Amino acid sequence: MAFELPPLPYAHDALEPYMGRETLELHHGKHHNTYVVNLNNLVDGAGLAGKGLDEVVVEGFKAGNAGIINNAGQHWNHNLFWRIMKKDAGGPQGELKRRIDQDFGSLEQMKETFKAAATGQFGSGWAWLVVDGDKLDVMKTPNGENPLMHGKKALMGIDVWEHAYYLDYRNRRPDYVQAWLDHLVNWDEVEAGLS
Ligand code: MN3
């Protein structure tokens, strides 16, 4: 079965002013959709027809197939990105809060580490909060790569391609990352990734 663009779990203006309507319309309706179209055009030739997205991502990475890495990777990455955003959803609670405090010292320290990864990714890519073995960690990846390709479980990830923030923040990536961490993370969804 062909891969499909999932609907956004909120209205296009639901994340304003931190992520604007026009950004979401273009980012979801054009950019993400293009990755899905490209991916569907590539899976047959890559010998991956009929396989689930996780398997396509992992197998494409193992094979060093750049088209699959970027388009399957980006489909996977954006699926997670839309799901773990919600405006002003508070902060981490329960098990997620306990593990952030345990592995980073505090939420503020985790945010600083995450922000350093997101602003330090040269060019296009992503920064992630991941489960690595029995610990939480932060990592960054270039272009369409993601933690699944590296054997890690992604809890949350921020898109730092310019198409994610240029309309709202111009070149100010650090401002975008800070606003995203402070106002756009759906911490309940992030915690759900632990189980
Ligand atoms: Mn994107």
Image (cartoon, rainbow, N blue to C red):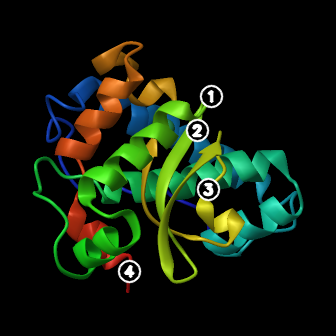
- Dot 1 or dot 4: first in sequence order is 1
> What percent of the width, then of the height, locates residue 145?
66, 50
The residue pinned by badge 1 equals 122
The residue pinned by badge 4 equals 194
- Dot 2 or dot 3: first in sequence order is 2
> What percent of the width, then of the height, locates residue 185?
25, 53
Q: Which mark is residue 147?
A: none
Q: Is residue 52 above or below residue 17?
A: below
> What percent of the width, then of the height, locates residue 92?
19, 66
Q: Residues within 10 Å of mark 4 (few under 14, many from 20)?
A: some
For label 4, the SS is loop
- Dot 4 or dot 2: first in sequence order is 2
Q: Amino acid at mark 1?
A: Phe
- Of tags 1 and 2, the one toward the viewer is 1
Distance from Cα at disc 4 to Cα at disc 2: 23 Å
Contact between marks 3 and 1 (CB within 8 A): the answer is no
View extreme (bottom): residue? 195
| Location of residue 195 (image quadrant) | bottom left
| Location of residue 18 (image quadrant) | top left
Q: Residues within 10 Å of mark 1 (few under 14, many from 20)?
A: some
View extreme (top): residue? 170
The residue pinned by badge 3 equals 146
Residue at image coords 26%, 51%: 108
Distance from Cα at disc 2 to Cα at disc 3: 9 Å
Q: Residues within 10 Å of mark 2 (few under 14, many from 20)?
A: many
User: Is residue 90 or residue 58 the one in the foreground?
Assistant: 90
Q: Residues within 10 Å of mark 3 (few under 14, many from 20)?
A: many
